[in-house]
Image: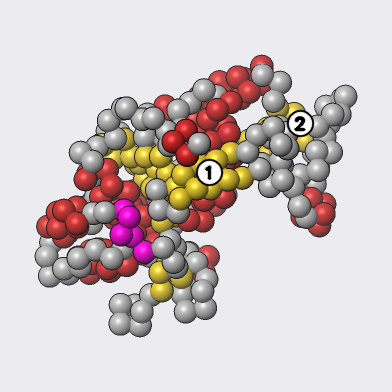
């Protein structure tokens, strides 16, 4: 059974880093970029950058340029042009049309506040409505019925993962009420268009993966291999993120930043070397099975 969970990918390795331009990169996002870059380069693969700029209210003007400068400063070279999701509307519309033709999409105007108060999976309130709701509405994708299908995949670090989408999260949103495309749909369409074979990203996205694999199946897009990295946490155990006060990387000391990210990944850390050389050493030692499993605590000394 397990062998069927390992995607039979023959294509040459294609990886990607997909930041949202909501601010500068911090140590957590650098760690993801470094791990994903090393995995691609160790496999003689290509590595692409995609700006996930689908949510204008959350974006910071100029953050995309700053992120690219930051990647360059740390020696993280990418292949091909940078993809901007804001320019990919036609591809998302085409995917939506495919899902609609398959009868998998319906309109939903349930207020988010009500759903939050109810808790649990989306109860399917709008699924069998005869008349479409007037006014603004979200678009939901029907999850496979319970028992019919569970989504299973093997994470390269965490092993077998099985989810029943009907139980969590239920039918899920693919276009928001405000007309913005949902991350789940966009990421599947764009990874498919790029021919991504391997996704290396933070563990916070592990729960999204089943939705994405289901969408890949609905859209006949190949399923890539996945590796979800442990997250950096602060002393209180909170994810190291902009919202919890993680500072942007100091671009005057890329060697030290990179050495810190490599040390957290259990890789040789040599801050005295230029970034390109640090990456060369790390690439020679890259072995995803040796990555730490648990949360990554920032030690005082490194902080
Ligand atoms: N844009 C997402 C983020 O910045 C990453 C998406 C992905 O890697 O699939 O967290």
Name the secondary structure under disc 1.
Answer: helix
Q: Residue drawn at (58%, 45%), measured in percent from left and top?
A: 162
Q: Is residue 167 magenta?
A: no
The image quadrant of residue 225 is top left
Indicate which disc residue 107 carries.
2
Picture layout, residue 5 above or below residue 233: above
Q: Nearer the viewer, residue 242 or 42?
A: 42
Query: Residue under circle 1?
Result: 209
Q: Residue drawn at (68%, 47%), measured in percent from left and top?
A: 168
Left or right of 12: which side holds 177?
A: right
Q: CA distance from mark 2 to mark 1?
A: 23 Å
Residue 72 picture location, percent across and down: 23, 51
Span of residues in magenta: 288-292
- Overall secondary structure of the magenta section: helix
Residue at the extreme top:
101
Name the secondary structure under disc 2.
Answer: strand
């Amino acid at each position: 059974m397990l062998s069927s969970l390992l995607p039979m990918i023959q294509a040459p390795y294609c990886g990607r880093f997909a930041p949202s331009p909501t601010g500068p990169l911090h140590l957590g996002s650098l760690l993801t970029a470094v791990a994903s870059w090393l995995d691609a380069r160790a496999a003689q693969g290509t590595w692409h950058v995609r700006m996930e700029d689908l949510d204008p209210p959350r974006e910071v003007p100029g953050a995309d340029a700053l992120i690219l400068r930051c990647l360059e400063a740390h020696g993280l070279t990418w292949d091909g042009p940078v993809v901007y999701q804001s320019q990919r509307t036609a591809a998302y519309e085409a995917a939506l049309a495919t899902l609609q033709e398959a009868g998998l999409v319906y309109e939903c105007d349930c207020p988010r506040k009500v759903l939050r108060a109810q808790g649990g999976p989306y109860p399917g309130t709008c699924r069998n409505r005869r008349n479409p709701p007037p006014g603004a509405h979200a678009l939901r994708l029907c999850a496979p019925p319970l028992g019919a299908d569970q989504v299973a995949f093997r994470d390269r670090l965490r092993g077998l993962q099985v989810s029943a989408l009907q139980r969590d999260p239920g039918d899920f949103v693919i276009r928001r009420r405000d007309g913005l495309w949902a991350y789940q749909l966009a990421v599947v369409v764009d990874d498919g268009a790029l021919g991504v074979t391997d996704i290396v990203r933070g563990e916070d996205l592990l729960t999204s993966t089943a939705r994405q694999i289901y969408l890949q199946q609905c859209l006949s897009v190949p399923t890539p291999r996945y590796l979800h990295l442990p997250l950096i946490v602060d002393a209180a155990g909170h994810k190291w993120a902009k919202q919890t006060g993680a500072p942007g990387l100091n671009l005057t000391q890329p060697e030290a930043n990179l050495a810190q990210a490599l040390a957290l990944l259990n890789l040789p850390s040599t801050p005295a070397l230029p970034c390109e050389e640090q990456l060369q050493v790390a690439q020679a030692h890259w072995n995803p099975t040796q990555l730490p499993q648990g949360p990554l605590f920032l030690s005082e000394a490194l902080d």
